[in-house]
Image: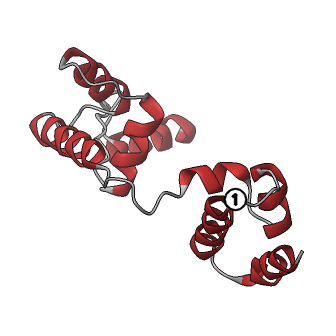
Amino acid sequence: MRQIEDLRVAGREPQSALCRKIRQERERGNALSTQRITALAGVSRATYYRFDPEGPPAVKDVELRDAIQRIASKHPACGRPRITAELKRQGWEANHKRVGHILREDNLLCIRRQKWQTTTDPRTATASIRTWYAR
């Protein structure tokens, strides 16, 4: 019972510290379920399972980021959909939302092309309108 109170007090600590304490309680053989312990600590189960201090660093994410940067520098006018398609052609399993997130983080937004070309000179257009009204 004392352990549960400790977790309640620990509710003000950062989530990583809470997850560490929950993991320690689970390793000690606490009779409470993971769902109950995380609820008492005020941490979602998803956060608890996501936090893994002994887990390997995300090397695959760094490689994906490198591939996206290479494609974006090679084709600066390509946006998220085309970069995602190119990654899939290269064999990457990349979600379009993840690609967009990385592009925004690295500020690799595409250069937008102008949709149409202006064919009227605004100085002449206003002059011709004035002459038309003067009639």
Quadrant of the image occupied by residue 105: bottom left
Please identify the residue farthest to the left as the structure is shown: 74
In the rendered view, tell whether residue 84 sits above or below residue 34.
Answer: above
Residue behind mark 1: 29
In the rendered view, tell whether residue 101 sits above or below residue 20.
Answer: above
Residue type highlighted by circle 1: Gly
Report the side of 58 relative to 10 (left or right): left
In the rendered view, tell whether residue 76 sits above or below residue 7.
Answer: above
Report the side of 85 relative to 104 (left or right): left
Please identify the residue farthest to the top as the structure is shown: 89
Observer-nearest residue: 26 or 64? 26
Observer-nearest residue: 23 or 123? 23
Helix, strand or loop status at disc 1: loop
Q: Residue at x 48, y 57 (%)?
A: 52
Quadrant of the image occupied by residue 81: top left
Instruction: Give coordinates of residue 77: x percent, y percent.
Output: 22, 34
Q: Residue at x 32, y 26 (%)?
A: 84
Q: Residue at x 36, y 28 (%)?
A: 94
Total count of labels: 1
Instruction: Give coordinates of residue 6: x percent, y percent.
Output: 79, 82
Instruction: Give coordinates of residue 10: x percent, y percent.
Output: 74, 81
Observer-nearest residue: 77 or 71? 71
Quarter that holds the N terminus: bottom right
Instruction: Give coordinates of residue 95: x percent, y percent.
Output: 43, 28
Rendered image coloring scheme: secondary structure
- Binning the other alpha carbons within 10 Å of mark 1 as few (below 14), some (14 to 19) or many (20 upward) gives few
In the rendered view, tell whether residue 110 sits above or below residue 118.
Answer: below
Residue 128 in sight: no
Residue 20 in sight: yes
